[in-house]
């Protein structure tokens, strides 16, 4: 089968398409013919040798990729044979996703609702569970001002919608007009370009001089610290990412000194992760949540996909398509 193999850490071109031995379904597993593989920003950091935590760096050589969607084509011992033919999404455990076939645990499969394509389902698999967990942790209330960083990205665009539906006044920050326009379309009341040096002052001005009640920080660094500074007493600061290359570094003591509660990104159990992803897919199937798929690349162009994400040129979610005719139904 074709897969993307990483034999060294470094620039995007370390991702190379190769012919490799296809996996087989072991006990309790199924074999999925992959139609769509998701890419997360963290995967670009891991590939570059800048994993947020050393445990995220795989032994080399490795096939990257943690989220896939496709059709079950075989089952291993102990897995229900009735799963064959079903459209599913699943996590792979951290590696193996950028490939035409994946062996995955049957217990972690999520059947894709008929109303969703496989691409939509994969776009929601990781980002949907992250956004739902963050929203539940911060619990924004009607009328509160909620700041969403990187609002034109995969997680950010979902947080805009979830906070909007919670009755909050959403303040979106992102880089560039396309991303800000998307945030407004999804329900943001205020949209500010955070590449402008005075963006925090622009946010305050748009809110009548006040701050925000909740800030979701997926960027970290100076932008994350500035966002934390916008949270007023009694509010919640929710750091969950480091797209800038480092975390905001706001301690519980520092936040408490300003009367702010620090709500770190949740670490759900495997069962909780499946439940959160399933809830995101069900919300999308019911029309309450819309994933934004900004761009797709053929599997062989994984390096170009990583480069596009790192250039900040992408909108919403970026996906890889295998072109596997055995997994094509619903892939669009």
Image: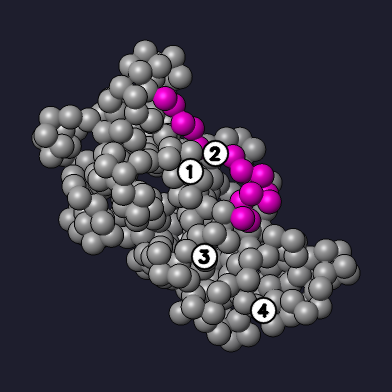
- Label 3 residue SS: helix
Marks 4 and 2, how far apart in space?
Answer: 30 Å
- Label 2 residue SS: loop
User: Are circles 1 and 2 on residues that touch, CB within 8 Å?
Assistant: yes
- Label 1 residue SS: helix
Marks 3 and 4, how far apart in space?
Answer: 16 Å
Residue at position x 33%, y 16% in the image: 258
Q: Which mark is residue 281?
A: 3
Residue at position x 52%, y 66% in the image: 282
Say left or right for 111 vs 115.
right
- The image shows residue 142 at horizontal and vertical percentages of 31, 44
Q: Which mark is residue 266?
A: 2
Which picture quadrant has residue 306? bottom left
- The image shows residue 57 at horizontal and vertical percentages of 61, 42
Magenta region: which residues?
261-275
User: Relative to 310, does residue 138 appear above or below in the rendering?
Assistant: above
- The image shows residue 292 at horizontal and vertical percentages of 37, 64
Q: Which residue is mark 1?
A: 136
Q: Earlier in the sequence, mark 3 or mark 2?
A: 2
Q: Earlier in the sequence, mark 3 or mark 4?
A: 4
Q: Earlier in the sequence, mark 1 or mark 4?
A: 4
In the picture, which quadrant includes the N terminus?
bottom right
Marks 1 and 2, how far apart in space?
Answer: 10 Å
Marks 3 and 2, how far apart in space?
Answer: 19 Å
User: Are circles 3 and 2 on residues that touch, CB within 8 Å?
Assistant: no
Q: Does the magenta run of residues contain 270?
A: yes
């Amino acid at each position: 089968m074709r897969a993307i193999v990483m034999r060294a850490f470094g620039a995007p071109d370390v991702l190379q398409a190769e012919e490799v031995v296809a996996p087989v379904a072991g006990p309790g597993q199924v074999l999925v013919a992959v139609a769509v593989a998701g890419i997360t920003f963290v995967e670009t950091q891991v590939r570059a040798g800048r994993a947020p935590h050393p445990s995220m760096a795989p032994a080399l050589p490795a096939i990257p990729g943690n989220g896939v969607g496709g059709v079950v084509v075989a089952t291993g011992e102990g897995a229900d044979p009735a799963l064959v033919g079903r459209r599913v999404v699943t996590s792979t455990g951290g590696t193996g996703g950028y490939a035409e076939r994946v062996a995955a645990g049957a217990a972690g499969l999520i059947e894709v609702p008929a109303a969703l394509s496989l691409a939509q389902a994969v776009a929601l698999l990781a980002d949907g569970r992250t956004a739902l967990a963050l929203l539940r942790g911060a619990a924004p209330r009607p009328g509160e001002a909620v700041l969403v960083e990187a609002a034109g990205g995969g997680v950010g665009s979902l947080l805009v919608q979830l906070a909007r539906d919670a009755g909050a006044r959403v303040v979106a920050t992102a880089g560039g007009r396309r991303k800000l326009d998307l945030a407004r379309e999804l329900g943001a009341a205020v949209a500010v370009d955070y590449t402008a040096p005075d963006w925090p002052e622009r946010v305050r001005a748009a809110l009548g001089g006040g701050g925000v009640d909740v800030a979701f920080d997926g960027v970290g660094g100076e932008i994350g610290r500035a966002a934390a500074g916008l949270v007023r007493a009694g509010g919640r600061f929710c750091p969950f990412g480091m797209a800038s290359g480092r975390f905001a570094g706001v301690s519980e003591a520092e936040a408490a000194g300003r009367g702010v509660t620090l709500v770190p990104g949740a670490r759900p159990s495997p069962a909780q992760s499946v439940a959160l992803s399933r809830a995101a897919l069900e919300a999308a199937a019911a029309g309450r949540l819309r994933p934004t798929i900004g761009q797709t690349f053929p599997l062989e162009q994984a390096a170009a996909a990583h480069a596009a994400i790192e250039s900040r040129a992408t909108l919403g979610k970026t996906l890889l398509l295998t072109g596997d005719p055995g997994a094509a139904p619903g892939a669009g």
